[in-house]
Image (tube, rainbow, N blue to C red):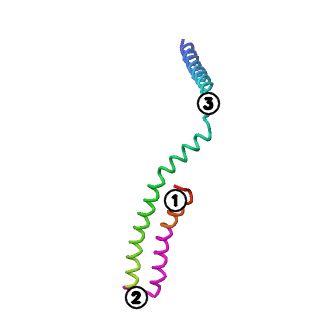
Amino acid sequence: MGNVKWGAERLLRRAKHALAVAVMLGLSIYTYAQDGSAGIREANTKVRGYFDDGTDLMYAVGAVLGLIGAVKVYQKWNAGDPDTSKVAAAWFGSCIFLVVVATVIKSFFGI
């Protein structure tokens, strides 16, 4: 009697799997791929929409780095380190780089 019950459960489980496969195959007939160029246009629109926020974020990061760099240069200057001008140029250059990159990318892509 136990084998009959186990066989019925097994048959029911197989029937459920077969039904699931049939439903998935049926649904796949009605699905289709969308136009690739429409997806690219939508992605382009979304990236352009976020670009101004990204530019503002780059400017904010540049401002924070500028403050950190100013403190580092001030500490070196007060300590009398001979390489103060080199450190100042490096920090100032990194801040200028962030601002220039954001501006050039903005003008290059016409955003």
In the image, the segment drawn in magenta is 78-97
Residue at 43% over, 86% down: 81
Q: Determine the image quadrant of residue 41.
A: top right
Instruction: Locate residue 36, reporting x and y percent.
Output: 62, 40
Question: In x, y percent, where is residue 7?
Answer: 58, 16
Residue at position x 49%, y 74% from top? 93
Circles 3 and 2: CB distance less than 8 Å?
Answer: no
What residue would you read off at disc 2? Answer: 80
88 in the magenta segment: yes
Q: Which mark is residue 57?
A: none
Q: At numbered mark 1, what does the secondary structure look like: helix, strand or loop?
A: helix
What whole-number distance in Å separates the C-alpha atoms at marks 1 and 3? Answer: 36 Å
Magenta residues, dominant SS class: helix
Task: Answer above or below: position of 3 versus 40.
Answer: above
Q: Residues within 10 Å of mark 2 (few under 14, many from 20)?
A: few
Q: From the top left corner, tell me how far across and down residue 67 is, in percent.
A: 38, 71
Percent position of residue 66, x then y = 41, 71
Q: How many numbered discs sit on the rendered protein?
A: 3
Q: Nearer the viewer, mark 1 or mark 3?
A: 1
User: Which residue is identified by label 3?
Assistant: 32
Which numbered disc flags the more N-terminal residue, 2 or 1?
2
